[in-house]
């Protein structure tokens, strides 16, 4: 009897391991990964993130209203793994100095502005885990704007400016941007 129980438990464990491996490495993710890059005038930036979709949900708002991403709560700026940004040279990020390197980038949404934070903890596989705030490098405020039309899939992109570039974040009825320039 004990041998049958052990075999049953072993089969359940094996099935669980196979399910996890399939979900992590084989199945197409619901929120696909994306990489965006900028390379002009000696400034190179790359952002790796995942793109969740609205799918009829309330995206930003009050927790009591069932918002997917409530105001005042940690958000990894995407889905799946933590969002990372890399700079090839020292830059100003939202007017604040940042050394060249790779950073975890996350946000705390608000109705009027998003707090965007760079953190030195990188290579975080599961981005839902909040970062160690003691490793935060800087935090800036990015005012909320309203796009011309709702954006179904979360998107990060770049637009050139006279002094560098803006990083543009858009999802649902919310967009915000962060200026980046060489120091």
Image (cartoon, rainbow, N blue to C red):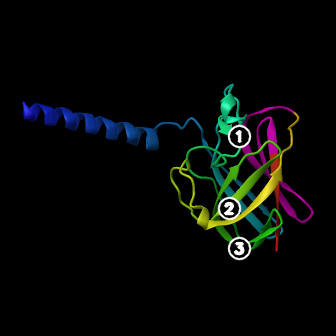
Say whether marks 3 and 2 touch (CB < 8 Å): no
User: Residue under circle 2?
Assistant: 118
User: SS at mark 1?
Assistant: strand
User: Residue drawn at (69%, 25%), measured in percent from left and top?
Assistant: 56
Q: Quadrant of the N terminus?
A: top left
Quick check: 39 left or right of 24?
right
For residue 141, side relative to residue 50 (left or right): right
Q: Are marks 1 and 3 in contact (CB under 8 Å)?
A: no
Left or right of 145 in this view: 63: left
Query: In the figure, residue 121 lies in which quadrant?
Result: bottom right
The local secondary structure at tag 2 comes to strand
Residue 170, compared with residue 159, is above or below; it is above
Binning the other alpha carbons within 10 Å of mark 3 as few (below 14), some (14 to 19) or many (20 upward) gives some
For marks 2 and 1, give the one nearer the viewer. Answer: 2
Q: Which residue does the numbered mark 3 point to in the structure image?
A: 99
The residue wearing badge 1 is 154
Spatial CA distance of label 2 from label 1 is 19 Å
SS at circle 3: loop
Magenta stretch: helix, strand or loop mostly = strand
Q: Write down the region rendered in magenta.
A: 149-175
Q: Position of residue 39 (x, y in %)?
A: 77, 62
């Amino acid at each position: 009897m004990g041998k049958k129980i052990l075999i049953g438990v072993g089969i359940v464990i094996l099935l669980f391991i196979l399910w996890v491996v399939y979900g992590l490495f084989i199945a197409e993710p619901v929120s696909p990964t994306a990489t965006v890059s900028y390379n002009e005038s000696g400034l190179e930036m790359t952002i790796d993130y995942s793109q969740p979709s609205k799918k009829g949900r309330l995206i930003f708002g009050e927790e009591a209203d069932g918002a997917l991403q409530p105001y005042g709560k940690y958000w990894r700026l995407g889905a799946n793994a933590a969002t990372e940004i890399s700079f090839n040279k020292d830059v100003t990020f939202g007017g604040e100095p940042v050394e060249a390197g790779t950073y975890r980038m996350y946000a705390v949404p608000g109705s009027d502005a998003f707090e965007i934070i760079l953190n030195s903890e990188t290579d975080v596989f599961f981005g839902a885990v909040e970062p160690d705030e003691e490793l935060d490098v800087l935090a800036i405020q990015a005012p909320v704007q309203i796009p011309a039309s709702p954006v179904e899939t979360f998107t990060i992109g770049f637009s050139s400016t006279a002094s560098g570039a803006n990083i543009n974040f858009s999802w649902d009825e919310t967009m915000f941007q962060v200026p980046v320039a060489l120091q």
